[in-house]
Image (cartoon, rainbow, N blue to C red):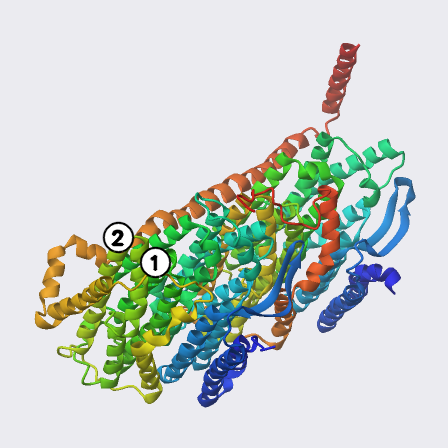
Amino acid sequence: MNDNLLSIILFTPLAGMFVLLFIPSAQRTLVKLWANLTAIAGFAVSIPLALNFDASNGGYQFAEKAEWIPLLGVNYHLAVDGISMLLVMLTTLTGMIAVLSSWTAVEDRIKSYYAMLLLLQTGMLGVFVSLDFFLFYVFWEVVLVPMYFLIGVWGGPRKLYAAIKFFLYTLAGSVLMLLGILTLYFQHYQQFGFYTFEIAELMKLNMPLHLEQWVFWAFFFGFAIKVPMFPFHTWLPDAHTEAPTAGSVILAAVLLKMGTYGFIRFSLPLLPKASIDASVVQIVVALSIIGILYGALVCLMQNDWKKLVAYSSVSHLGFCTLGIFSLNPNGIAGSVIQQINHGISTGMLFLIVGVAYERRHTRDIKEYGGLAHVMPHFAKVFAFALLSSAGMPLLNGFVGEFTILQGAFEANPVWAALAVPGVVLGAAYLLWLYQRTILGQVTVSSNLHLKDLNLREWLVFAPLIAWALWIGVYPKPYFEILQKPVAQLVERVKPGYGGGAPVQAVLPRKEAR
Amino acid sequence: MHHLWLIPALPLAGFLVNGLFGRRLPKAIINAVAVGSVLLSFLWVLQVLNGLMPLETLYVERYATWIASGSLDIPYELAIDRLSAVMLLVVTGVGLLIHIYATGYMSHEDGYYRFFAYLNLFMFFMLTLVLANNYLLLFVGWEGVGLCSYLLIGFYYLKNSATTAGNKAFIVNRIGDFGFALAIFLIFIQFGTLDFPAVFSAAQPLPAESTAGILTAICLLLMVGAAGKSAQVPLYVWLPDAMEGPTPVSALIHAATMVTAGVYMVARSSALYLKAPLAMDVVALIGLLTAVLAATIGMTQFDIKKVFAYSTVSQLGYMFLALGVGAFSAGIFHVVTHAFFKALLFLGAGSVIHALEGEQDLRHMGGLRKKIPITFLTLACAWVAIAGVPPFSGFHSKDEILLAAHHHAPWMYWIGVVTAGITAFYVSRAMFLCFFGKYRGHHHPHESPVSMWGPLAVLALLSLGGGYTHIPQFLAPVFPLAEGAHDFTLVAISVAAGLTGIGLAWFLYIAKPGLADSIASNLGGLYKLVYNKYFVDELYFATIINPAIAGSRTVLWKFLDAGLIDGTVNGAGHMAQWVGAKCRRLQSGNIRTYATWVVLGAVLLIFTIGGVR
């Protein structure tokens, strides 16, 4: 089974979707049940991937390779390393949760809705497991379509604006990225005499710095819009706010990670010279730090519960890109862990908003207040999600943030010093949100009889709570999984950096010894 | 193995039981779980110490790896030496008394189980903080106690002022943590480890930095963290507001234990501070400034808890003065005696408030010594202790600090003496206003139950006799004893300052009542300045918070985000639509128009090709 495990994981949601299309729309419960079964199966088939993954093996595992379009040198090539394995697990788990969370939230055209969710699932998984650039690009674009419809059909009042904005924004980035990919493709033909989209082959390219820089920026637009990095982030608040809860969860937990993953999988190893070029790094790091602080400050000002959570993603993803471009093991490993963490924490925060929205059909913070009184369990789960997002030690966020900041400090102490206030602001906007929605007296009478979490909602939160605790208390397995691939990546961009011995050169050890 | 992990794990178990099931449990079981877990933890501390005495070296237990990435290798490792032993005894001992007290004090409150769950969780984090053997695990406890402080300040979550005070405490502490986090990064870069023994032994051979260097930077950043947690200038502003929490919380977290975490952390890092004399000076100056500033504010407040809160800030300043002048053991000694008498002051104040059904204003008290005599007697013990009357506990520890300050710089001693006088004055003022004269309120005061005055009595004995615990001698293996004999004159002067403070308060509030008010009105602006706490909160709002909020709203969000960036994006969209609309006209369906375009194109083509040739 290990021989084509990745294909099974990849196509289980798609296969489920095709079966779903044959279920009559009138059979609403059956549609929901089948969608949930497919999503559970999608997660279940991914469990052997984690269990059989060999952390001591630094290379790609579970590889599958077949010719697809020989004329163009396109292969169907799937495989995972530690980085992509973790992202696959994040995708299958949050996919399952997103489907389950929709049971009562979406009542309109449910068959198409679940079909879109499942198609999206396959698209995202494809992005993380493809080792052929063409295949990757196909999945990258596939993701756009169901997400466009999820926002545009099942979204809030301004859904069309948000959906078109999302689509055009990310499409513009993708087109630039395509130019970058084609440059590499033709360069490879020039240098080696045959056409290929294989990542491993393209890594053999030796291009002049200026050309690498051009390609880097072409990729950068594609990935930075997806992340999203400041100033390419303005699609995100609208898309997140208008999307249905499950769409927001998937968007935050997985879709944004396609951008950070792109930096790690393509920008760094394919363009090592450009990736360590001081001018490039400075720009990317500056945008990351601006994103961290800017996102947090704008969060403080939001009156819309969901928009606040959306802007917090800009801040959190800023930490992820800062970690990547610290270009050392701590920064990159921390960044991957933080990508998982952001999926868990922000996923929970969006689910929280969803629970409130489903009961009151408003996202206006002023409409809430005093919910601790009527929904005590909800208040506790929210508090947990908040602490996990704000980086409380022994929960997941702290592990990622600390490792990233240690990495950033190793690269340049000023970066860390500028980024840390983002942690202070993170506590501020979340606590203030909590105070305004949960604490105090119940101020709006329609909140007086809200129902607390039901069993299904508990089931939605439970895996995320458990995962947050696991990463926070015992993150060792994650670091072990990441150790080899991250070390190889650092070796690729900065040969001789080593396993990450502290850089003495950064700060002269004055008067030591 | 001595199973050090049981010490924090027992209260954690208490938290889990009460936190998960407390809603459905009867009060007796909640009490048994909450108090019992702390009692067991206290007994286990005694058991461990019994097994490890004389404990002249560090005893370490390693359980597992926590974070291992690249060069980082951070274990779950607990350790105990004489410094942590002292802290453990104070935290579990005083903590136990306050838990018992709280079963009485909180008996009529909603959310009883929630209160004790949080209190147990606090014990878990505080004990982790004290037992941690590396900076990051200490930071876990550090953040954890901050969280519990937030939860307990905002315990009365229906009150907006309480939840706002909780937010303020958490966020101001986070500002301090900014410094602490950077210090941790810098320590790791410099030493390649965060383990205490490894860092300190690596720092040992380094020469003291005569100018600001790496170690000075590390120590200053650590001090930023300590200033947040231990309420020093300029980050002390959260502590007075923290009095919104129930009184046992004020006693346990905001007087006896958590706020001394910064003192503990600096003392723990003494090996680094000794190599950074500049940072030591900064610590001493901040401590001194905080001590004076808070003491003067304490003279003017009328809320009994606020008086004691500013007193705590001031006494913490004293402790930092001790650390800064190199008298680490004197600083810890004062942590211990202060834990006794300040916990007692708060619990006593709680007993008064309980007796008066929530009244906290000193102006509505008076003459209570006959109505609640046990509370009065026990509070009187704290009074003489904090006022520095020999031979009670505060006298001993304060004396050690003042002598060390004199040894370092005589002017520091003199400011310390004046502060001691002010301290004696404000505590005496509170006592006179509360217990003497005529009763000015309209409640029917009643004495508290034994669950409350029992702990008061124990703390009273400790406040009286705590000076003879010989903490500095006990700590000698950790901190070498300072040389220099006791100078009788210096001691006499500081005692005289304390007695003067008491006498002045007696004169103003007993002998000539009304005189204080007329002095206050004569001082006019100066009095208003102090009474309004030097307008520090207002200053922070005007210079930092309001500009940040306004800037975020108008400049970042409205102008940059919605205006400039989105404007550009939407503008590009509109531009595309416009171009599309114009180009659409080309496709008019009119054959003659098409023919014209074809001809024009052909002509253009010919000319272009011709031009190229």
Q: Identify the amino acid type marked 2.
A: Trp
Among the 4 quarters of the image, the one containing residue A70: top right
- Disc 1 versus disc 2: distance between alpha carbons? 12 Å
Q: Is residue A282 left or right of residue B104?
A: right
Q: Tell me the quarter of the image containing the N terminus of chain A.
A: bottom right
Q: In the rendered view, would you say B29 is above or below B407?
A: below
Task: Give coordinates of residue A350: x percent, y percent.
Answer: 58, 62
* Identity of the residue drawn at 58% across and 56% down: A402
Parent chain of label 2? B
Q: Is residue B257 left or right of residue B609?
A: left
Residue named by callout 1:
B321
Q: Measuring 43% from the left and 44% from the top, which residue is drawn there? A: B210
Q: Nearer the viewer, residue B261 or A55?
A: B261
- In this view, the residue in front, B489 or B285, is B489
Question: On residue B6, which mark appears?
Answer: none
Residue A62 visible somewhere in the drawing: yes
Which element is circle 1 on? helix
**Vertical arrangement, residue B439 with respect to residue B500, above or below:** below
Mark 1 surroundings within 10 Å by alpha-carbon count, few (fewer than 14), some (14 through 19), many (20 or more): many
Residue type, numbered disc 1:
Leu
Q: Quadrant of residue A278?
A: top right
User: Which of label 1 and label 2 is nearer to you?
Assistant: 2
Horizontal and vertical percent position of residue A470: 64, 68
Comparing B575 with B535, the one in front is B535
Q: Residue at x 49, y 41 (%)?
A: B560
Q: How many marks?
A: 2
Rendering coords of residue A310 (x, y %): 56, 54
Q: Which residue is mark 2?
A: B411
Q: Quadrant of residue B173?
A: bottom left
